[in-house]
Image (cartoon, helix red, strand yellow):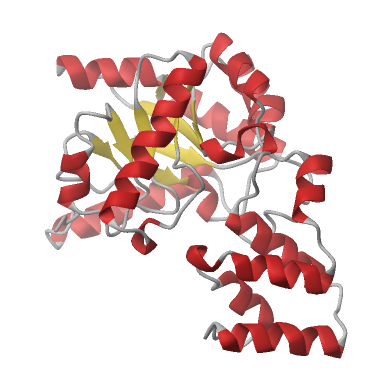
Amino acid sequence: MIVNYHIVSDQQLPYINNLYLYRNVDTFVRDLDFYNKYYHPIGMTEFLDSIKNRTELAENSVLLTFDDGFREMSEIAAPLLLEKKIPATFFITTDFIDNQKLNHDNKQSLLIDRLKGGISSMGYNKIMKLMESFHIQGKHLHERILRIPYKESQLLEQIATIVGIDFSLFLRDQRPYLTSSQIKGLLAEGFTVGGHSCDHARFPELSLEEQIEQIKLSIDILVKRFSIDYRVFAFPYSDRGANAALFEAVSNEVDASFGSHGLLEDPVKTHFQRISVEKFDQSAKKTIKYHYGRRSVYNLLNREYIQRS
């Protein structure tokens, strides 16, 4: 079983609050205690060895993964994982290392958070006019902002100017992502890292060539910069729509890749699905129980395997 998180924090984070749920420290610690009690935590190296050598893992093995590369992984999650003696892999969006760029999604959340405080009628009308010019629909303004495509990210910059947000200033002051030094520290502590695309692109919006480039380049950057000898990748958002041609094209570049379809099986032998534990506002135990029930239903319907065109 492979589980996935994004961030652990007791703070209300305006660049994440409007996107998804995330664990506070107490809840995360309870999750870790649950894994230690009922499962056998393993690291990525052990996982890859089992693939390469075709050996069985210990019964009830669990692999913990974290996406996006937020600084809380070094400052909060890693110390707790070390205390509980649980290994983990951090999938990093390489353009964000050292806070060089801000994720499209994090921009969206910051804008929504600012709009919750109110906006002038003039500002509102300007934003709505922009939305209409880009054919962005939605009942409420925050819904429209969340629907702005990755390829239309410049629209977020225009809205930020209207509401008075400076994304560059936010990056400089808040520094939400891991630095190179923090990543080196994680590796020195025995954790592993993997690619998570260059700029957290929505893969369905990309051509096959662009998808291949995002996978290969993000891994290459990590291998070169941090001298790692393995090549793993986790799809941003989801691997939905990733076809057989993509996996064939990167088969010699990736030791293992990961999606987010719970306990479903994948026809690509080096591609594995993960349970998104944060998706539900409940314990890891209840979330995992739900996924086992879901898997049972899919088995009855003969739909336990994901289809790849």
Give left or right: position of 222 versus 174.
left
Residue at position x 65%, y 64% in the image: 108
Residue 309: image location, x then y, percent: 14, 58
Give left or right: position of 246 versus 23.
left
Residue at position x 60%, y 58% in the image: 105
Residue 180: image location, x then y, percent: 63, 23
Residue 262: image location, x then y, percent: 34, 48
Residue at position x 65%, y 31% in the image: 178
Viewer-proximal residue, 142 or 170? 170
Viewer-proximal residue, 143 or 160? 160
Q: Quadrant of the N terminus?
A: top left
Quarter of the rendering containing residue 256: top left
Confirm whether residue 71 shows in the render: yes
Give left or right: position of 298 versus 149.
left
Tally of marks: 0
Vertical placement of residue 106 versus 248, above or below: below
